[in-house]
Image: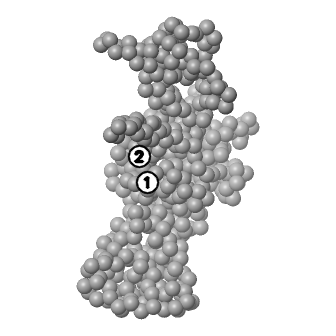
Amino acid sequence: MQLRYNGLNCEIEYKTAETEAAAPVSAVDVFEDILATLPLKTRGSYGKALRAFKKSLQGGAPTLSALSVSHVKQWIAAMATDGVRLSTACHYLDCMSALAGKAVEAGYALDREVFAHAPQRAASGEIVTSPDALLAIGRQARPGNAQCALSSDLLLFSQYSGGMPLGEIIKLEQKADAGTFRGPCAEIAARYRSERRRALFPLSQSRRAHASIEAEQSRRIGALLSSAGSGLRDYSPGVAVALWAAAALAAGIEPSIVRACIGDADTGTALQLVDPASGVDVSAVHLSVASFVSHAPERWHAMRLRRGILPADVEARIAAAGLSMPATFYPMTEVVRRVGHRMQRDIRAFIPDVLFFKTTDTAIAPLLRTIGDIAWCYRETNSPQSPYAVISDAQMLAFQRIIGSFTPDVELMRPTLRDLGIGRRVRITAGAMCGYEGVIHDVPASLPGHLCSKRRIFSISFLSDFGMQWSVDIDEAFIEEL
């Protein structure tokens, strides 16, 4: 027997073993049926947990028999990426575990321990779920004030090193530790190189106790972050790790990889429930996050659409989530083919199922969390910790010239072709005929209200090695005089 609650009436539906086998039951449907039988007092919190679990299921809810621990781990990873508090995540898991237990008692074939989790210690309260303040500091010009600039560099050096505590940074020496500095950390270290000092940073280590220096810089960096809108008051070791983890997740690093980098550090979020990945190149992850923190221009990326998905579907999903739609490029071409005695024109994509989009590295992770079940973004390698592949502006412009289709941000400089006329030899610089040379044989007159009234079209003839001759109409922006 299955009890379904529709808000007004209760409908009882009988299902036999034969019908269950013929129509596999969705796990979410079963949990919703169980939820409808609970008292109103407990239905609210259990409903929140079920909605959060359902939201994390990319590609649809699994059947009851297919529900496994991997789906739960996927949910935990989604909560970690969203910065859900550890206490909230544990409460949601307890609620779903209770629903699973009630489903087993109702006769459904289900592993009641599928939502079980290892008990975790309470969160410390040093919870940082947004890296916005760090990104603002990392991407703005260095402060002119020497003390403020030093505090800013200490913050960035710590974050570029995976959240290194201030106590360890104070002990760094120029010569002894020089070989450990890489990437932007090496750039910061170079600014403070001095033959008169053993320590890397000028913090009066020889005249002051390290604990006093750490407390002072913790307050200064806390004030720096607070002025950028973080709400933090200090920069304790817990804040340093939690802030780096938030930046790594915003950069698109998988939660399991982030967990492997920070170990058992207390972030106060669901990240503590994520199983750490193995074989992680921690140094490479640090460099990737450092690049993300220090610079985030809008760059072109390539998105692969899953089977049957169109760019309009992606745009609708992003709009429904309340996110801003990035600039996109999905070039189309007209294909002419003969069908019987007539010519048929079809509009097709140049590269089917690949949507180009331009956005900052910061925006990719939340974008994919919204459309991850219908599209995915290419990375530089097959590794999930690899950075998202970037298409340079030069490569994108060259591609657009080849296909003869341009994005709105490209402004074509039309050449001066006043003297071009019939009989002049030219070369085509864009489109399917890019690189071909031919002779102008006609210059169609501009007609009022016609497309030609806004641009000049040249009819160019080509003569092949086989004695065949054909012509094509080309916009003046795509030809050059020889």
Looking at numbered disc 1 in the image, what kind of residue is underneath it? Ile
Q: How many residues crowd mark 2 within 10 Å: few (<14), some (14–19), many (20+)?
A: some
Seen from the viewer's position, the closer of residues 232 and 228 is 228
Q: Earlier in the sequence, mark 1 or mark 2?
A: 1
Q: Secondary structure at mark 2?
A: loop
Q: Secondary structure at mark 1?
A: loop
Q: Position of residue 198 (x, y in %)?
A: 56, 34
| Residue in the picture at 58% in, 38% down | 297
Give the colour scheme of this rendering. Answer: one colour
Mark identifier at residue 309:
1
Q: Position of residue 394 (x, y in %)?
A: 51, 27
Residue 275 picture quarter? bottom left
Residue at the far front in the pictured view = 341
1 and 2 marks in contact (CB < 8 Å): yes
Looking at numbered disc 2 in the image, what kind of residue is underneath it? Asp
Total numbered badges shown on the rendered structure: 2
| Residue in the picture at 59% in, 67% down | 125
Q: Would you say residue 105 is visible in this rendering? A: no
Q: Position of residue 81 (x, y in %)?
A: 50, 60
Residue 381 picture quarter? top left
Residue at the far right in the pictured view = 145
In the picture of the structure, the residue carrying the numbered disc 2 is 353
Residue 240 picture quarter? bottom right
In whole angstroms, how far apart are the C-alphas of marks 1 and 2? 8 Å
Q: How many residues crowd mark 1 within 10 Å: few (<14), some (14–19), many (20+)?
A: few
